[in-house]
Image (cartoon, coloured by chain):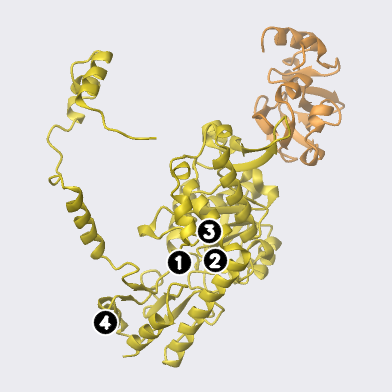
Amino acid sequence: MRYLPHTSEDITSMLEEVGVDGLDGLFSTIPEDCRHRDDLNLPEPLTEWELNDRMGALSDSMAVSPEYKMFIGAGSYQHYIPASVSSLLGRSEFVTSYTPYQPEISQGTLQAIYEYQTLTTRLLGMEVANASIYDGASALAEALLMALRITKKRKVAISSLIHPLYRRVVQTYCEPSGYEIAELPYLDDGRTDLSKLAGMNDLGAVAVQSPNFFGCIENLKEISEMVHEKSALLVASFTEPLAYGLFKNPGSQGADIACGEGQSLGIPQSFGGPVLGMFASKMKYVRSMPGRLVGKTTDMDGKRGFVLTLSTREQHIRREKATSNICTNNSLCALAAAMYMASMGGTGMRELAMLNYDKSEYLKSELKKAGFKINFESPTFNEFVVEFPAGFKNTYERLLEKKIVAGLPLAPYYPELSSHYLLCVTETRTRQDIDALVREVKS
Amino acid sequence: MKEISQLNLPDDVRYAEEHEWARPEGEKVRVGIDDYAQDQLGDIVFVELPQVGDTFEKDEEFGTVESVKAVSELYMPIGGEILAVNTALEEFPELLNSDPYDDGWMIDVIPNNPDDWDALMTKDAYIEALKGGK
């Protein structure tokens, strides 16, 4: 589809057709005092090459990869995107297609979503996945609402080691609905403290993230047993799904709902979006799941076909009974994730996960050798917390000048961790990058 | 779809406008959806029923039934307390298609208002209502 601006002749003939004098005539129903009369306060137009220069200058003013060496993850990860993904995703039949409302004519789009769902369930070890939603944070909030619908309870417990911004989104979703949110503190080993659970009643769901915000792997199996004893559901959240290439996935550990951010799977960071909300659950809860699903079926002639399934849970069909106010999915991002997972294959995911783990363990051990403290001793994947000496802020600034971003300061999110930084190493960091970082923080 | 003359409409139940049936069984009243409703819905794939002990007024929604085509709300033909639900429908929702008046029953209700029963339609009145384009 091409988008061409109308010529003034086009506009005149259209206005004539509807019988008004000029553009003002079209807007006559809008009250005068609601209309903006002056010119818009915008700079003069630029030529394309001037505009390119301007955008270039803007992007140069920011510390971004690949120019800067990033040791920061915290929910958005720099991973290498295979050329196959970028190339296939740019095909016009994918880029221009919106999620279908006349689904049967969009067999290709539906099949692509179906493949995404299949690969997602395999990665997460779950029985059914939806066609995706906005992002990891809204996926978590939707998962908690879903658990409350299923259990008919009014309270959720959420680990303080879930991404801080995700917890804010959960509050936004749950509080106006009158649901109660209890926060679970964390232990000295960097894992969630579950002791408060024992005294809690009327609990519909417990949410934990693994790897959690400190990068530590939670003991999901043990947690799921405790949660199920309380007749609540375990919602397993994640920001780094690549970890499941190496660590046991939520489904195999007893999670009822697994949800999180899929940006790691072939989606560029691009200042926080668009990203991908992955959402999967046990089959028995599928009717309470938000969003849409694509199913496979056969037509009257026995030919394979793909269809939107359980659309009656969506608000464009049945508004007041919808399982969510989200009535779309992130189809193109889901497609990127499907292409990424298919390109990597099971073996590739495992090798890449191993590479992330090894490189991050290397940085961890080098920092330990250099005398820095790693307080949370639980196993990690590609992120971990390090305590730097007081006054490290100056070193951090100095490193920024050298185009190294030495992790995320945790103080704004966890005030008690004033000199702690969350460091991340993915496959995109070389040994030279890591050695340079260690050398610089030591000096 | 069946013609009205083809519908199985027993004499021992009464009918509600929303196509539920009700049959007195001693103290309680058994409730389900009638042959017309199951025929209109087509293959039924899921039934959501209330919990024992819940109380509803007449015409209040007590559950949903989902076919491959649509989801429909279920409305109480008579008000009262839920005494029992047919849990077999959780696993075998197709019983609603094959046997709507017996194996496909939905709930048993202890009625709380005798007037509710009197407001329900007899078979003949229901057939008239269906002919009227309901």
Q: Nearer the viewer, mark 3 or mark 2?
A: 3
Labels 3 and 2 positioned on one and the same chain: yes
| Residue beneath disc 3 | A340
Q: Are marks 4 and 3 in contact (CB under 8 Å)?
A: no
Nearer the camera: disc 2 or disc 4: 2
> Gap in Å between the C-alphas at discs 4 and 3?
39 Å
Q: Earlier in the sequence, mark 4 or mark 3?
A: 3
Q: Residue drawn at (48%, 44%), measured in percent from left and top?
A: A94
Provide the letter of the chain coloured yellow: A
Please say if the residues under marks 2 and 4 sit with CB atoms less than 8 Å apart.
Answer: no
Residues marked 4 and 3, same chain: yes
Considering only vertical position in the picture, is A278 above or below A252? above
How much space separates mark 3 and mark 1, taking CA atoms?
Answer: 11 Å
Q: Which mark is residue A242?
A: 2
Name the kind of residue labelled 2 in the image.
Leu
x and y, in percent, of residue A72 in the image: 40, 71
